[in-house]
Amino acid sequence: MNIAQWLHRQAQSDGARPALYLGQELIADYLGFHQKAAALAGWLQAQGVEPGDRIALFMKNCPDYLITLYAIWYAGAAAVPINAKLHGREAQFILQDAGAAMVFTSPGLDDALSAVGVATPVTSTGAEVYRAALASAPIAAPMQRNPQDLAWLFYTSGTTGQPKGVQITHRMLMAVSLSYFSDVDAATGADQILYAAPMSHGAGLYNMLHVLVGAAHVCPVSGGFDEMEIFDLAAHFTRVQIFAAPTMVTRMTAVAKAQGRSGEGLRSVIYAGGPMYLADIIEAEAHFGPIFIQIYGQGECPMGITALKRSEVSDRAHPDWKRRLAGVGRAQSGVELRIGASDGQSLPAGELGEIMVRGDAVMPGYWNNPQATAQTLKDGWLMTGDMGVLDAAGYLTLQDRSKDLIISGGSNIYPREVEEVLLMHPLVQEVSVVGRPHSDWGEEVVAFVVGQASEAELDALCRDQIARFKCPKAYIQVGELPKNNYGKVLKTELRARLL
């Protein structure tokens, strides 16, 4: 089944329901949304686009993003969303690797592609040809697709080496969407999803389930993340759900406290995409109330590995609440989860090992990369590369990526444990811990710190909380931590600075 059938059905059953907003301005109801997508799909077919072709979106968050995405699916093609913050050369690599037949851009981004000589045909949503395409003869209904057919080709953020194309099928999108209702949140047609994070990533992956229930889709006029804009739109629409990276949550908390904003109208904030430190989520929940839900996933199992429900995030009565809140919840309904040893054998509860996942939300493999696929998928299990511990109740606690493990003097040191301690200091805003080569010990612990705390204060805090061998041997004060376009700290860049 084509995932775009959900839009077609919603248009048939309740086409007058508001669908697409730019800020507070209504752009289209569900019938209009469907008609625009169907017309653009007809234009795509007239250009020679066939089922299975890859069509890229290099666009900022806007209503045309969703119209174009569904037009691609209506035509039976596969979407290749590219983060609008990428450099033109990075986008060019993705277009070439995906073999994209065409790329849609939002106004201004076509210049970034022309500057690097992209050969793929480019259509800007601000151009007359796009407006004319929306007036083309529409197709009657979405093309039929099989569940295993490619729907979304997602390119990993590429923190090490070139990004890889994760094949996301229609079955995967359905599995993740349906698990949302049972494991994450009870979205309804009375809700609104606000796209403050890139629609090319996690935020966009939540569009389908909101189409299914007939919720409204709100794109900020800014095209991205602006704390005050989010608060204003939430207060206007009153039942807003957003997906946010942990760094976005901490910024929202800081701005809300400074500006006296309560977050009125924010119904749900689903956070993922990096470590959410215990002190940060406690502060956020104390200010905004019980609106937070955590999920854990990877591009290879998008948004679909575990979830920590809002009742669990806000729980302060359970004797183990702090450890659970510092973790990422329990397995979502559509997957199996286990902790594996280095040979892939299952480990008992309480043992540290690699997180392994299988189920309908797991990718079939990487695009044109059988070697990477073989390394990542073993006997049907996705080897996530993340280290973690499952307790007897099935709650997962992440440690670190296996490549981020620090081995000093033969002892394993997990950076997150040290980072959690340093963030206890009130003058520390952000921190990232990495290993630095050492001639005697193999590696030594180094902390990059954003904040005003002195080295003596930080060292005293660590010595009071953790074993001496885990304490950083150096504290490097920085104005900000390097991050990729999804807000993840680039530890590879920090390690390079040390060298």
Image (cartoon, rainbow, N blue to C red):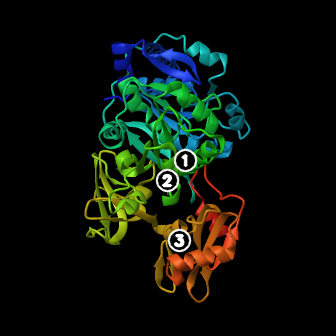
Please report the residue visible at 38 percent of the width from the left and 21 percent of the height from the top.
142
Q: Secondary structure at mark 1?
A: helix
The spot of residue 403 in percent (x, y) is 50, 68
Q: Is residue 59 visible?
A: no
Mark 1, residues whose alpha carbon is within 10 Å: few (<14), some, or many (≥20)?
many
- Taking depth in this image into account, of 23 and 135 the one nearest to the observer is 23
What kind of residue is marked 3?
Val
Horizontal arrangement in the rendering, residue 445 relative to residue 273 (left or right)? right
Q: Is residue 237 above or below residue 96?
A: above
Q: Earlier in the sequence, mark 1 or mark 2?
A: 1
Please report the residue visible at 52 percent of the width from the left and 34 percent of the height from the top.
264
Q: Is residue 271 visible?
A: yes
Q: Quadrant of residue 328?
A: bottom left
Please report the residue visible at 52 percent of the width from the left and 66 percent of the height from the top.
420
**Label 1 with label 2: CB-CB less than 8 Å:** yes
Q: Residues under labels 2 and 3: Cα distance?
A: 17 Å
Q: Which mark is residue 418?
A: 3
Q: Quadrant of residue 441?
A: bottom right
What kind of residue is marked 2?
Ile
The spot of residue 483 in percent (x, y) is 62, 54
**Which residue matches tag 2?**
281
Q: Which mark is residue 249?
A: 1
Please report the residue visible at 46 percent of the width from the left and 68 percent of the height from the top.
402
Q: Is residue 274 above or below residue 70?
A: below
Q: Is residue 263 above or below residue 415?
A: above
The spot of residue 461 in percent (x, y) is 58, 75
Quarter the C terminus occupies:
bottom right
